Amino acid sequence: MLLDLTGKKALVTGIANNRSIAWGIAQQLHAAGAELGVTFLPDEKGRFEKKVRELVEPLNPTVFVPCNVQDDEQIETVFKTIADKWGNLDILIHCLAFANRDDLSGDFSSTSRGGFSTALEISSYSLPALAKGAKPLMMENGGAIVTLTYLGGVKVIPNYNVMGVAKAALETSVRYLAAEMGPNNIRVNAISAGPIRTLASSAVGGILDMIHHVEEVAPLRRTVTQQEVGNAATFLCSDLASGITGQVLYVDSGYEIMGM
Ligand code: NAD
Ligand code: 0WE
């Protein structure tokens, strides 16, 4: 079975709660037989750590490490831990984004220097930063890196604003990383998911409108689920996708093809 991930080691970033897209991906990778490592965003009270630990426990992760992508040292420690515990890495899931909430409404031209920098640092730079750590651990056997993007990086989606710029940088990073790492048989792809209600998305005005619009005009007349995104990610990480790199795969009920 080409889709069997038994014996593959997968690091999943971006799980915050049971609505996270990363949680949908982790469940499907686990169902395909992968051994999981999970990172969490550390906070002072350790609340995220506890929440994520309890959520992922049924998937028996053998690596569980803090990772704030704004901190180079934490990124280094993640891959040091994987090198020590696993020796190598087959799959990296990059599933995180952040912009100041103020920057996700109003005039795009009002984005501050700092807000622009934060959005691109966390949502875009983190991909090459994590890929750098993964590369030496994937060199021997090849590997697969998958990130999550959104149509707002290509077309104007009201209020997505600076996150659109960040996703454009992310998608371009996918292409440059794919070109760099292809000779090492490391494939790098993105999934462009349709709007899904998650912690990050429901905190933003405008996303509900987007969801209703998708339900009206997308060919499938519905939104997609975290599980469907997880299935596509599992495919991209499997040998079924051995010839695919540098691509953006739309998992969006077909919305992207429509002209309305
Ligand atoms: P989510 O809130 O569940 O996930 C976002 C994650 O980013 C959280 O786990 C959070 O801890 C993490 N994060 C934020 N700042 C971080 C930092 N400094 N270091 C490490 N981690 C940090 O929301 P989600 O919707 O599942 O988002 C996951 C990805 O999917 C994002 O890249 C998002 O842009 C993308 N996406 C979401 C939708 C949607 O409609 N929900 C659609 C397309 C793409
Ligand atoms: O990428 C995203 C959301 C990313 C995001 C969400 C938040 C909310 C909480 C980044 N940073 C923050 N910061 C916060 O403080 N999506 C694709 C979901 C999304 O966000 C939108 C959307 C859609 C869809 C914002 C405006 C319009 C549509």
Image (cartoon, rainbow, N blue to C red):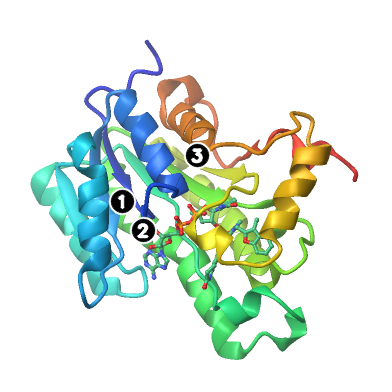
- Residue that label 2 marks: 130
Between marks 2 and 3, how big is the CA–CA gap? 23 Å
Mark 2 vs mark 3: give the one in front. 3
Residues 38 and 247: in front is: 38
From the image, state whether disc 3 or disc 1 is nearer to you: 3
Label 2 crowd (10 A; few <14 / some 14-19 / many >=20): many
Where residue 260 appears, x then y in whole percent? 90, 45
The yes-or-no answer for disc 3 within 8 Å of ligand 1 is yes
Residue sitting farthest toward the right:
259
Please indicate, yes or no, whether residue 134 appears anywhere in the rendered image: yes
Spatial separation of the CA atoms under disc 3 and disc 1: 25 Å
Q: Which residue occupies 57% across, 77% down?
A: 101
Left or right relative to 30: residue 98: right
**Vertical placement of residue 229 versus 211, above or below:** above
The residue lying toward the viewer, choosing from 227 and 155, is 227
Residue hosting label 1: 134
